[in-house]
Image (tube, rainbow, N blue to C red):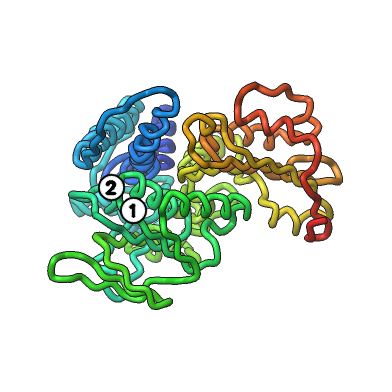
């Protein structure tokens, strides 16, 4: 008989924490999971899911325009922001209910409260002041948007969290940041009719992505009417008496907008969590340091997901949770595999990518073959839209293995998922060449690029 109240206590009700709690409970373990906000975590409540719903909403104005080229006559259209928010909230409520139902059915106890560590086996339930003990503890509290407290006027700004709950759409918005969150919201707001400006300190948006994808998306966004200011930052934000915001930039620009959104990164949500009391080590960013099995330096405490700052993606947190189950409860030591993770940016057009960028591969291999196609998608021929797709394969010339695949265009995220399987399997360019094309599709370009567009030797294009 265990001397602890629980076999496992999970702090944080996001995707990783819920998966660990639910599966552990289904194995017969006595499990409790505490969440201070809502079950589902960032992804379900104020991240990937509501964002994707907003992406869909923002695309309809282009769909209506495109319809004319295919013989449709579309009448006057109107958009109602409050209806979208209400519909989004209804779906989020449904999903949270499913998360809770899964935990209940598995026999995991749900605690609606913040929980903090007291020592290696003890947790404080803040709502009641009660302490409980557990043989093992998982910290899966995720991350939170950086608020940029050093920015004069930061209190007038919103983060991605606030963007989901605006009472009304602004007439204009300024978004600071160049990562996927900033880029996706710039496209969302623009598509909903908001005058949108994106400001980023770097030379080009989406650092760490392949340069062709970055430049191609930048050009496409500008062509739509989104203003992009690179190598610039906001110096201060002032609120006028009538509620409008005035932002001044380092390059001397003055922008008057209805909202300023800061999307300058996310930080591990570890403040005041009791980590120091329990002896858990963190890095300079406050992320919990873990080994290959998600163990902290304290034997009884584990950490999963964004709070570890390894790879900030929902499927990764779920994967890490399942590896925890295999290692701790099935006597099958399994470390999370963070290699070759397919990624999508739900910009407009989308980016789908897996593996190395050309720039990364050029540093890793002596010689590369680069296959690149840029073309107008079939749908655009009748719609009249001047959009372009870019597809790119990076191949190690020595063994013909495909080490990177990158797509800019409609459904790029869907294609990236399948390419993830292909690259994970170690397929070569010859395997691509032997694969029959599905015609007419955009994806057929991936298997019909037979000759290299160019080569990269010792880091230089030749």
Q: Residue 250: x, y in percent? A: 41, 77
Labelled pair 2, 1 in contact (Cβ < 8 Å): yes
The residue depicted at 42 percent of the width and 32 percent of the height is: 66
- Residue lying at the far left of the rendered structure: 241
Q: Distance between the residues labelled 2 and 1?
A: 7 Å
The residue depicted at 26 percent of the width and 34 percent of the height is: 77
Q: Name the residue under label 1.
A: 160
Would residue 161 be found to the left or right of residue 22 on screen? left
Q: Residue 206: x, y in percent? A: 53, 56
Q: Is mark 2 on a helix, strand or loop?
A: loop
- Residue 164's label in the rendered image is 2
Look at the image and tell me in which quarter the C terminus lies.
Answer: bottom right
Q: Residue 271: x, y in percent? A: 35, 63
Would residue 340 be found to the left or right of residue 400 on screen? left
Q: Can residue 451 be seen in this view?
A: yes
Q: Residue 414: x, y in percent? A: 53, 32
Would residue 337 be found to the left or right of residue 93 on screen? right
In the rendered view, tell whether residue 225 sits above or below residue 79: below
């Amino acid at each position: 008989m265990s001397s602890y109240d629980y076999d496992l206590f999970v702090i944080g009700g996001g995707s990783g924490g819920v998966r660990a709690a639910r599966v552990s409970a289904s194995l017969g373990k006595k499990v409790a999971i505490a969440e201070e906000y809502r079950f589902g975590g960032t992804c379900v409540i104020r991240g990937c899911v509501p964002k994707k719903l907003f992406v869909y909403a923002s695309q309809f104005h282009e769909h209506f325009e495109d319809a004319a080229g295919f013989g449709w006559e579309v009448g006057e259209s109107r958009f109602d922001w409050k209806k979208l928010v209400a519909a989004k909230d209804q779906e989020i409520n449904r999903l949270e209910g499913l998360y809770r139902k899964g935990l209940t059915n598995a026999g995991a106890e749900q605690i609606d409260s913040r929980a903090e560590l007291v020592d290696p086996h003890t947790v404080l339930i803040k709502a009641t002041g009660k302490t409980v003990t557990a043989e093992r503890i998982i910290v899966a509290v995720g991350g939170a948007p950086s608020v940029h407290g050093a920015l004069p006027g930061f209190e007038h700004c919103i983060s991605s969290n606030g963007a989901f709950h605006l009472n009304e759409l602004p007439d204009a918005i300024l978004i600071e940041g160049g990562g996927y969150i900033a880029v996706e919201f710039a496209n969302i707001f623009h598509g909903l009719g908001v005058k949108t400006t994106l400001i980023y300190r770097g030379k080009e948006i989406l650092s760490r992505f392949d340069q062709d994808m970055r430049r191609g998306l930048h050009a496409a966004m500008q062509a739509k009417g989104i203003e992009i200011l690179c190598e610039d930052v906001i110096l201060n934000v002032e609120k006028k008496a009538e509620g409008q915001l005035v932002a001044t930039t380092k390059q001397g620009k003055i922008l008057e907008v209805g909202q300023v959104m800061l999307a300058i990164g996310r930080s591990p949500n570890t403040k005041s969590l009791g980590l120091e009391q329990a002896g858990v080590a963190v890095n300079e960013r406050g992320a919990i340091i873990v080994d290959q099995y998600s163990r902290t330096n304290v034997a009884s405490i584990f950490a999963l997901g964004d709070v570890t700052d390894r790879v900030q993606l929902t499927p990764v947190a779920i994967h890490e949770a399942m590896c925890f189950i295999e290692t701790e409860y099935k006597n099958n030591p399994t470390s999370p595999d963070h290699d070759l993770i397919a990624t999508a940016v739900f910009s407009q057009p989308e980016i789908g990518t897996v593996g190395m960028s050309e720039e990364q591969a050029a540093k890793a291999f002596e010689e590369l073959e680069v296959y690149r196609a840029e073309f107008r998608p079939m749908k655009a021929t009748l719609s009249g839209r001047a959009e372009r797709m870019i597809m790119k394969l990076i191949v190690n010339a020595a063994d013909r293995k495909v080490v990177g695949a990158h797509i800019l265009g409609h459904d790029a995220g869907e294609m990236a998922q399948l390419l993830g399987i292909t690259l994970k399997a170690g397929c070569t360019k010859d395997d691509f060449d032997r694969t029959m094309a599905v015609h007419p599709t955009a994806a057929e370009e991936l298997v019909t690029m037979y000759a290299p567009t160019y080569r990269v030797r010792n880091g230089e294009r030749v």
